[in-house]
């Protein structure tokens, strides 16, 4: 069981770079990279909300549960 992070998919759909998204959301590019690769152990709701706002999506578009 795992949680997949589809952040890279949404970024490609919205044609936004990691550096630009990180700046808009208010996190470092390194932390955005950790989220994109699925290596993050947790995500703050405020960060998730900011990502959804900037990518114009829902949390379920970014996170996926897989058996």
Image: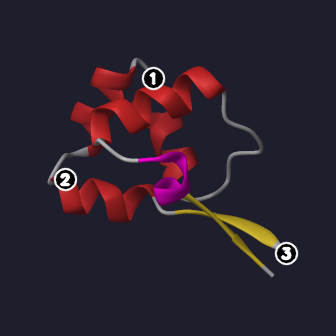
Looking at the rendered image, the disc whose residue lies closer to the viewer, 2 or 1, is: 2
Who's the residue at 22% across and 33% down the image?
20
Looking at the image, residue 25 sits to the left or right of residue 21; the answer is right
Q: Secondary structure at mark 3?
A: loop
Structural crowding at the residue carrying mark 3, measured as other residues with C-alpha within 10 Å and reported as few (<14), some (14–19) or many (≥20):
few
Residue identifier under label 1? 27
* Image x and y of residue 59, in percent: 53, 47
Instruction: Measure the C-alpha gap from mark 2 to mark 1.
Output: 18 Å
Structural crowding at the residue carrying mark 1, measured as other residues with C-alpha within 10 Å and reported as few (<14), some (14–19) or many (≥20):
some
Q: Secondary structure at mark 1?
A: loop
Q: Earlier in the sequence, mark 2 or mark 1?
A: 2
User: Which stretch appears magenta?
Assistant: 58-62
Looking at the image, residue 55 sits to the left or right of residue 43; the answer is left
Looking at the image, residue 55 sits to the left or right of residue 63; the answer is left
Q: Nearer the viewer, residue 20 or 43?
A: 43
Residue identifier under label 3? 1
Who's the residue at 56% across and 47% down the image?
35
Label number found at residue 14:
2
- Where is residue 51, by image quadrant? top left
């Amino acid at each position: 069981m795992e949680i997949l992070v589809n952040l890279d998919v949404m970024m490609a759909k919205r044609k936004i770079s990691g550096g630009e998204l990180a700046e808009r959301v208010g996190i470092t590019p390194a932390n955005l990279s950790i989220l994109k690769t699925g290596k993050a152990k947790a995500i703050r709701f405020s960060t998730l909300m900011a990502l959804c706002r900037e990518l114009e999506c829902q949390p379920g578009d970014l996170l996926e549960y897989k058996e």
